[in-house]
Structure formats: structure tokens, C-alpha cells
Amino acid sequence: VVARLKGVSRGSLHVAVATTANYFITHLLAAFHREFPEVAINLSVTNRQGLLQQLQENRIDMVVMGEPPAESSLVGEAFMENPLVVIAPPDHPLTQRKRIPLKTIAREPFVVREEGSGTRAAMTRFARRHQIQITPAIVMTSNEAIKQAVSAGLGLGLVSAHTLELDLYAKRLQILNVAHFPIVRHWYIVHREGKRLSPAADAFRSFLVDNADSVWPAAAEAQA
Ligand code: PGA
């Protein structure tokens, strides 16, 4: 792969990633940058709805997001799992329990992402499929804000495990053992159908697909 990519000496790369992908994509960008130091990198961070809009307006080479909508004229390739989990502060009584039933969880207040977030959409689909009601007590547009709020005791949270590396390590938050969790989604690298990718953009796409698991092993661990 590296030999094929060596032709990419310069150029620029405009990537937008989901607010949730922000946590691991920087590790991959760093590795890509070591390989291709002359490629200028531009990264923007927004939610799923914002990403779809940037693609639609052709303002971006590629985006990293959850599964693209089936009916869209977008091409996407899955490259890594994205497990969604329920989080609580370490002193919450539910942290002591195993296989917590969904109906127990549904009685708790939740701090959740905004409409337009892929995490929020996955939560809504999951609740519908399992016929439970998850009550959004508080809505926040940032994973960091949700984690702070949960840690402060405002409710349980539902976030991607990829946002949690440091918080688990620092024992600020704990993943609850809930029946039917994690909700397993996937990260996709997505571009418009028929889009002519620059050599730099194409190199990044291949790099991501080939290196996702090795560059950030924590992502693979979180899936286990
Ligand atoms: P987010 O994630 O919009 O919840 O940040 C993107 C996605 O899951 O598609």
C-alpha cells in the first residue's frame, strides 16, 4: 500500500468528521501526516446532519460518519466498528449490576445528543426496536458536555465508546452492563458518487481503510 501511495507528495486534504469520530481520527491523521508530511490537512468537525449537508453542497472531499442514508447518492466504505454504550458516574447504584434490563434503564433520566446527531438517531431506532421509551432529560450538542453532565450526576448518558478512553482510565465514568448493549454501528468513509478524488484524498481513504485498527488499538479493544 505504502508503495502505491508514495506518489502523493503534496496537495491538500479536506475531510469533515462526525463530532464522535473526532476522538480517533486525529490518531489516524497523525500517522498519515508522518507518511505524507507535505499534504496539507484541513479537518472540520460537525454532526451527522452537518456532514450530509457538506457532502450535498460538494464542499468537502470526504467525510467520516455513521452509515450513509441508503437512498443517497453517496459512496461509503465501512472501516471500523462504533459501539454505543450507556455511561454512569462511578458511584451510581446501577454500576453494581449485571445484565441490567432495558426497562430499568428506561426509568432513568438521560443526557442525550441533539436531533441531527447520528448517535441520537441510533438511540431512537434502538428504543423503537425494543419498544422502550428513553426520556431525554437534557439535550447537549457535544459528547464532552454529555460526559461532564453524567459525571456530575445529571443522568445516564448514551455515547460512542470511542469518546471514553480517558474518562474510563481516570475512573470518572463507567460503562453500564445493560442487556442488548453495546449498540454496534460502523464508521464509514464517505464521498459523493462520481466525485473525482484528488490523489491526496484517495491516499487518505486507502490509508484509513488499511490502518484503522492498527493505528488506534483502543478502538479495537472497545469493541471486545
Ligand atoms: P454524531 O455521529 O453525529 O452523533 O457525532 C455521527 C454518526 O454517528 O453518524
Image (spheres, rainbow, N blue to C red):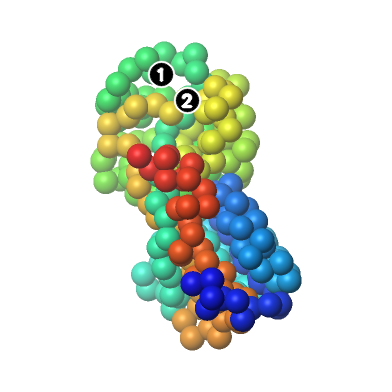
219 sits left or right of 40 in the view: left
Q: CA distance from mark 2 to mark 1?
A: 7 Å
In the rendered image, the quadrant that contains the C terminus is top left
Dot 2 or dot 1, earlier in sequence: 1
Helix or strand or loop: what does disc 1 sit on?
helix
Q: Is residue 69 above or below residue 120?
A: below
* Residue that badge 2 annotates: 174
Tag shown at residue 95: 1
Residue at the (49%, 72%) spot, across then down: 1
Q: Give percent across and percent down for residue 69.
A: 41, 67
Q: Is residue 34 above or below residue 166?
A: below
Tag shown at residue 199: none
Q: Give percent across and percent down for residue 110.
A: 47, 31
Residue 116 makes an appearance in the image: no
Name which residue type carries label 1. Thr
85 sits left or right of 64 in the view: left
Tell me whether circle 2 and circle 1 mark residues in contact (CB < 8 Å).
yes
Res 3 quadrant in image: bottom right
Q: Is residue 156 above or below residue 45?
A: above
Residue at the (71%, 77%) spot, across then down: 10
Res 63 quadrant in image: bottom right
Res 70 quadrant in image: bottom left
Residue at the (41%, 37%) spot, across then down: 85
Residue nearer the viewer, 184 or 28 = 28
Residue nearer the viewer, 150 or 176 = 176
Residue at the (58%, 56%) spot, across then down: 28
Count the marks.
2
